[in-house]
Image (cartoon, grey):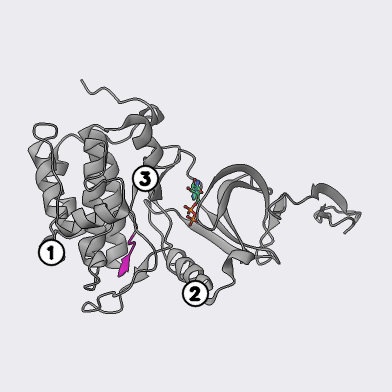
């Protein structure tokens, strides 16, 4: 290692003359151009920057041996100095690691070097439902059924494993090249210890926060159903049900269950499902399994969607 640079050497060579195949450099964030999982020795070349979140910067990573592309979340250890920050990270990894479902971003690996923690994930190249919603505003009912059905399938799986996501929102619903939905970001997720267990605390500010979380009355699986109601509303009507210009006013509207579904904009099955998901009393809401067989899903649902729906509405005629 000269000048802080390391070489990746080709150790498959027969004559034992190790030839460097790539120079490893570091960018301004101290992220190496080749990231190595010390356990599996898999080498990933750092590619395109995908986006950043609260803690993480996310890059496309390519496994140098197989050519397979992944998403790599890189969290600087300097962000994880406080005990509870580490605990949250561990919680996220522990929960996400235990999951395997067609509609959940697949967790691939977790490792660290002296500067960063790395989380390797299934790559979702088509961004998320948030970008789709921003471009399109409203989404047609067949598309909404297509997307929401997949989200509900993943939630049935999660709730069955006693896991609550607690921050279902458009930005956490990722899309791959096949336009399949993949739930990601388990940063606020929690595990329910027993059927009577109700969570009292939530560290963070979920986007579509349920009234029982605001009121600190204890919450459970039903918070994901509430969020799903907000997602349905937003996709079909183009804006969130409790939107105001301040968090305080939004919370006040949520507490009062103060939202309006405009008349004659959407089918009555859609109205009925949104209303059931947004009931103020958590136990009055349907479960994810009940939602799955709701009348709303009896309407035409496409089997696949083209990537063009990211920008323009499909035509069903
Ligand atoms: P944080 O937990 O720090 O908020 P996120 O999980 O939101 O980080 O990730 C930050 C950004 O990285 C996202 O907004 C998105 O643009 C991108 N990203 C995250 N996961 C993936 C993925 N699996 N595939 C593609 N891009 C992703």
The residue lying toward the viewer, choosing from 49 and 144, is 49
Name the residue at the top extreme.
317
Residue identified by numbered label 2: 84
Identify the magenta region. Answer: 162-166
Determine the CA span between mark 3 and mark 2. Answer: 31 Å
Residue identified by numbered label 1: 281
Residue identified by numbered label 3: 181
Q: Left or right of 18: which side holds 70?
A: left
The residue lying toward the viewer, choosing from 231 and 22, is 231
User: What is the quadrant of the C terminus in the image?
Assistant: top left
Point 56% across, 48% down: residue:
70
How packed mark 3 is, by other alpha carbons closer than 10 Å (few <14, some 14-19, many 20 or more), is: many
In the rendered image, residue 185 lying in the magenta stretch gets the answer: no
User: What is the quadrant of the N terminus in the image?
Assistant: bottom right
- Of label 2 and label 1, which has the lower sequence position? 2
Q: Residue 243 carries which label?
A: none
Point 51% across, 47% down: residue:
123
Ligand 1: does it lie within 8 Å of the C-beta at label 1? no
Find numbered disc 3 in the image and state the secondary structure of the residue it sits on: strand
Find numbered disc 2 in the image and state the secondary structure of the residue it sits on: helix
């Amino acid at each position: 290692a000269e000048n802080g640079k390391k070489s990746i050497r080709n150790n498959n060579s027969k004559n034992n003359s190790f030839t460097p195949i790539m120079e490893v450099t570091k960018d301004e964030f101290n992220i190496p151009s080749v990231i190595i999982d010390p356990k599996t020795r898999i080498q990933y070349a750092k590619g395109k920057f995908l986006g950043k979140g609260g803690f993480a910067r996310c890059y496309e990573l390519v496994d140098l041996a197989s050519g397979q592309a992944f998403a790599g979340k890189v969290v600087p250890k300097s962000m994880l100095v406080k005990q509870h920050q580490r605990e949250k990270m561990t919680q996220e990894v522990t929960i996400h690691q235990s999951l395997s479902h067609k509609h959940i971003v697949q967790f691939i690996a977790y490792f660290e070097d002296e500067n960063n923690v790395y989380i390797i994930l299934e790559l979702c190249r088509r961004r998320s439902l948030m970008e789709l919603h921003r471009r399109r505003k409203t989404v047609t009912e067949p598309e909404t059924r297509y997307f929401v059905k997949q989200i509900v399938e993943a939630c049935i799986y999660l709730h069955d494993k006693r896991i609550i996501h607690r921050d279902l929102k458009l930005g956490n619903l990722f899309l791959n090249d096949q336009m399949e939905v993949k739930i990601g970001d388990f940063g606020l997720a929690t595990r329910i210890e027993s059927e009577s267990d109700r969570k009292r605390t939530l560290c963070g500010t979920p986007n579509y926060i349920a009234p029982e979380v605001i009121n600190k009355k204890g919450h459970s699986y039903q918070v994901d159903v509430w969020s799903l109601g907000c997602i349905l509303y937003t996709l079909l009507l183009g804006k969130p049900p409790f939107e105001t210009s301040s968090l305080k006013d939004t919370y006040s509207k949520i507490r009062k269950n103060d939202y309006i579904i405009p008349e004659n904009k959407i089918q009555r099955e859609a109205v009925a499902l949104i209303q059931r998901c947004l009931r103020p009393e958590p136990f009055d809401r349907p479960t994810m399994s009940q939602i799955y067989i709701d009348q709303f899903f009896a309407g035409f649902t496409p089997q696949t969607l083209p990537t063009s729906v990211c920008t323009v509405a499909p035509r069903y005629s």
